[in-house]
Amino acid sequence: FFNLGTAYMRGSQLDNLDRAIKALRRSVELDQNYVQARINLGNVLAAQGAFEEAIDHYRRALALDPENALVRDNLNRILALSERRSRD
C-alpha cells in the first residue's frame, strides 16, 4: 500500500491524491510504526489543506524517529502555515 500511495502522490490530479491518501492510510493501519508512510501521508494531507491531520502524522513520525530532519522540517512548515491560516 505504501508503494501504491507513493505512486498516486506523483500524480497531480485530485483523484490521485485521494487514492494516495487511501493507500497510505491503509499502509499506516498495517504498520503504525512505518515512519515514511506517515511522512508521505502528512505530505498529501497538507497538500489538500488538511493541516491538523497532517500535523498529527508528522508528530507521530517524529516520535518514532526523533532525528529525522525531513519530518521535523515538514512539521515546522505546516505548523507555520496552519498558524497563518488561523490568523487570516
Image (tube, helix red, strand yellow):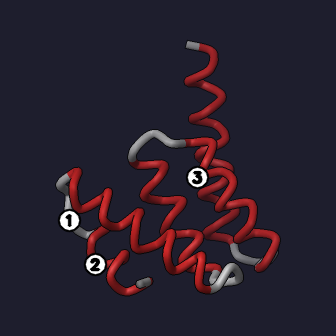
Q: Amino acid at mark 2?
A: Ala
Q: Looking at the picture, does residue 27 appear above or below residue 8?
A: below
Label 1: few (<14), some (14–19) or many (≥20) C-alpha neighbours in 10 Å: few
Q: Is residue 7 left or right of residue 75?
A: left
Residue 2: image location, x then y, percent: 44, 83
Q: Looking at the picture, does residue 42 appear above or below residue 14?
A: below
Residue 55: image location, x then y, percent: 65, 51
> What element does badge 1 sit on?
loop
Nearer to us in this view, 69 or 8: 8
> What element does badge 3 sit on?
helix
The quadrant holding residue 75 is: bottom right
The quadrant holding residue 44 is: bottom left
Image disc number at residue 7: 2
Label 2: few (<14), some (14–19) or many (≥20) C-alpha neighbours in 10 Å: some
Image disc number at residue 60: none
* Image quadrant containing the N terminus: bottom left
Residue at label 3?
A: 54
Residue at label 1?
A: 11
* Image quadrant containing the C terminus: top right
Rendered residue at 58%/76% (across/down): 28
Which tag, 2 or 3, sits closer to the chain's start?
2
Q: CA distance from mark 2 to mark 1?
A: 7 Å
Q: Amino acid at mark 3?
A: Ala
Residue occupying the far top of the picture: 88
Rendered residue at 59%/71% (across/down): 38
Q: Are marks 2 and 1 in contact (CB under 8 Å)?
A: yes
